[in-house]
Image (tube, rainbow, N blue to C red):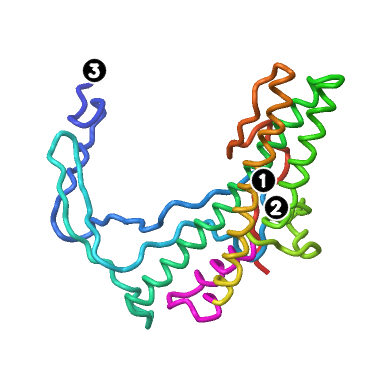
Amino acid sequence: RGGGGGGRGGFGGAPPAKVTTDEGLNTYSLSLRYPDGVNFRNAIYWAGNGLNGPMGAPGTYTVRFSAGVNPVQTAPVKVVPPPRSTATEADLVEKFKLLTKIRDTVSAANNAVRTVRNVRYQVDSLRKVLTGEQKAAFEKEANILMDSTKKVEEILYQTKNEAGQDPLNFPIKLNNQIGAISGFLQNADRRPPPQAYEVWNTLAPQLNTELIRLKKQIALLLPRVNATLKAAGKGPIVPSTDELGQAPRQGPQATFIP
């Protein structure tokens, strides 16, 4: 009964050929895409959100190669501008720098939104377990904190957005306004035009002002809230960017480009 061939599993057929190092069809696709930015649940944007990791700029990179127990090898790799583009290497370096700033700035705004919602979730959870005078004292201070931080949240993000077309009815806010610059820049391999820098230089300071404002609000008002919790025998609220609670059943995060 059958002896059948020297291939895999004894069913015949030649074993797979070893990959050669000869010049020819052997290729490796190297991704120069940098990590994406920070988002939050069910965020809806219009005309770009600025969170896509930028593509690495042209220049010389070092590639590290490892296989099994063999020593790690390194080699220089030269990345050149797209051959059909008239942009210089310096042009694309400037594009990379601005896209990176946009990604990091929108991420900071989104982390601020996440922080506000994190604290709100903790406040709402504590409202359910406190009673009597302890609850009244807690809510007095908590309402001041939440009212203040909500104003910052609403400047950073359009909180009325619930469906993909809502930005047609409610104006986009700072995180989306800045993110939309990225959507414009990624359409072509070129140096960012002066208008992109003008919009960036107008909006980025406004966003930074709100981030500082939020930090001060939490530093000033949260200790007062936590003092009422201590008096009630409860642990303090510790703000973070963690998204607490079960994610709402909504559609996926979306970016709509008109």
Residue that badge 2 annotates: 152
Residue that badge 1 annotates: 217
- Please tell me whether residue 92 is drawn above or below residue 254 in the rendered image: below
- Dot 1 amino acid type: Gln
Q: Nearer the viewer, mark 2 or mark 3?
A: 2
- Please tell me whether residue 204 is drawn above or below residue 219 in the rendered image: below
The mark nearer the N terminus, 1 or 2, is: 2
Residue that badge 3 annotates: 1
Magenta region: 176-197
> Who is closer to the viewer here, 133 or 7?
133
Element at label 2: helix
How far apart marks 2 and 3 lie (CA) works out to: 79 Å
The mark nearer the N terminus, 2 or 3, is: 3
Element at label 1: helix
Q: Residue at x 23, y 21 (%)?
A: 2
Badge 3: how crowded within 10 Å, few (<14), some, or many (20+)? few
